[in-house]
Amino acid sequence: MEKLRFTFAVLAASDGKTNLICITSIETPDGCVYDVPDEKNANKHTGITSLEVYAKIKNSLKKRHQTRKIWIPLTDQLRKIYLDAGENVQFDDQYLDEITQDTKSSNNNSKLDPEHKNFVKIADKFLLEKFSGRTSNVNQWIEEFETECERFEILQDESKIEILKHLLDKQCLDWYTGWSQVKYAYTFRYQTGSLLEYATKKERLLLEDQYLNITQKQEETSTDKRLIYKNSSKEEENQNEIAINFNEHIKEEDFKINMNNLNAQQETEINNLIDEYKSCFAKDKYDVGKIKNYEARIDLLVDKYCSKRPYRCSIEEKKEIEKQVGNLLQRNLIEESYSPFSAPVTLAFKKEDQKKTRLCIDFRELNKIILPQAQPFPLIDDLVVKTRNCKYFSTLDINSAFWSIPLRIEDKKKTGFVTQEGHFQWTCLPFGLKTSPAIFQRILSNILRKHKLTEFTINYIDDILVFSKTYNEHINHLKQLLEAIKSEGFRLKFTKCTFAANSVKSLVI
């Protein structure tokens, strides 16, 4: 044999987040295809990755599940790796199994058979609300759906559609025969003309005018936008930009105060200011303080309770859950409960720890019956106008922000959740409720207004931006804000704060 045909594919790593380029099969010139076993990661095939053609293959594979089939001439080195003396296909001291037509058919049937892949039960375990077009941003929902599919190793397009049937509601129950059509149906952008005509032309999308209007409006108002506020001075164009974390899902590097634009005296003033208000900075994520004269309320659309059994988990995950629940109990953030409400708990992958350590309460059923709370969020255009001609920027991040807000006593029972060891409820506003961002945005905005800080501050949920035209003015603004934070009882997360930077990069949803 003079050459072999390798199939390269982009697949999910074990963490469900990282993409890997893998070799999934090897084909001979006579048409026989051999399955590559567990050693699919292309990095284990050093004879291939050292070739010039591999660089082109990497450049060709950008998205997950993309594939490329490439004929590669056999060098003496490759021949020793993939063929024995009798030209039988091998790898890593074992012969590879030939993929026959019967094997393909059997494998596909087993993957698509609902009796083998109990799709109803899997869909019920998805940490995702049913999509109706009225409660979710369409692009964000599709991304979360695909993430959940990866978590449960649902990789076949046909299987995704079987799962999708159980997660759509109302008009969205019009679904399609191919996964690419499904994704396009819910993420396409409307331009001009009749909505119904446009939908019909695009992959026969049978959606109603009203539904398309709703999804298009939400898509436009919820698109990620990135802004950079800069001093226009050419001398400062090379200064580093400081990131403001306006989204808790975005990982930031450990904080370092950037003072390249300050002189020695100004640096000393900033350090003294931080030292003066060091009591405002949290020791850990559980050090949240309690704000005064405010409380959160949870109103329901219907008078009923939601109750689900605890999710199954491994011994290691169980220990991690109980450890975190113990910390929450010790800090009085939760308490034992006798409530009829019980939401299950799971662990999500946390990139910083490279494992599942993020405690998540599955409030999906509760969120379905919670009365929404309308609260405006800052507009990018307003932010641009307010920060015009400003040269100094600081950003302050509220530590574990929602936990700073006490819950109304009669609403604590509604936040009940269960682990395999007990039943608990929150004493403060928990993460995971659909109204939590609006509640916190309203409370923090009211506090800034109460202390007359809105002329030089603006907040997006738990992040506060301070902007000033001069350094002395900025120091005064920071003092006023830190004094207000101290008096109200908030705690700041030091690793996500920046002080007196001459440019900032903000990410606003």
Image: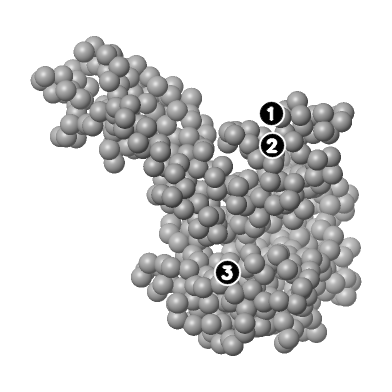
Residue that carries the numbered disc 3 in the rendered image: 361
Asked if residue 495 can be seen in this view, the reply is yes
In-front residue for pair 394/156: 156
**Residue drawn at point x = 83 percent, y = 56 percent:** 378
Residue at mark 2 to residue at mark 1: CA–CA distance: 8 Å
Q: Nearer the viewer, mark 3 or mark 1?
A: 1
> Quarter of the image holding residue 31?
top left
Q: Earlier in the sequence, mark 3 or mark 1?
A: 1
In this figure, which residue is indicated by the disc labeled 2? 185
Q: Earlier in the sequence, mark 2 or mark 1?
A: 2
Which residue is located at x 80 percent, y 40 percent? 208
Residue found at x 15% / y 34%:
93
Q: Quadrant of residue 302?
A: bottom right
Residue 206's spot in the image, x, y percent?
Answer: 74, 36
Q: Are marks 2 and 1 in contact (CB under 8 Å)?
A: yes
Tell me the CA gap for discs 2 and 3: 30 Å
Amino acid type indicated by mark 3 = Ile
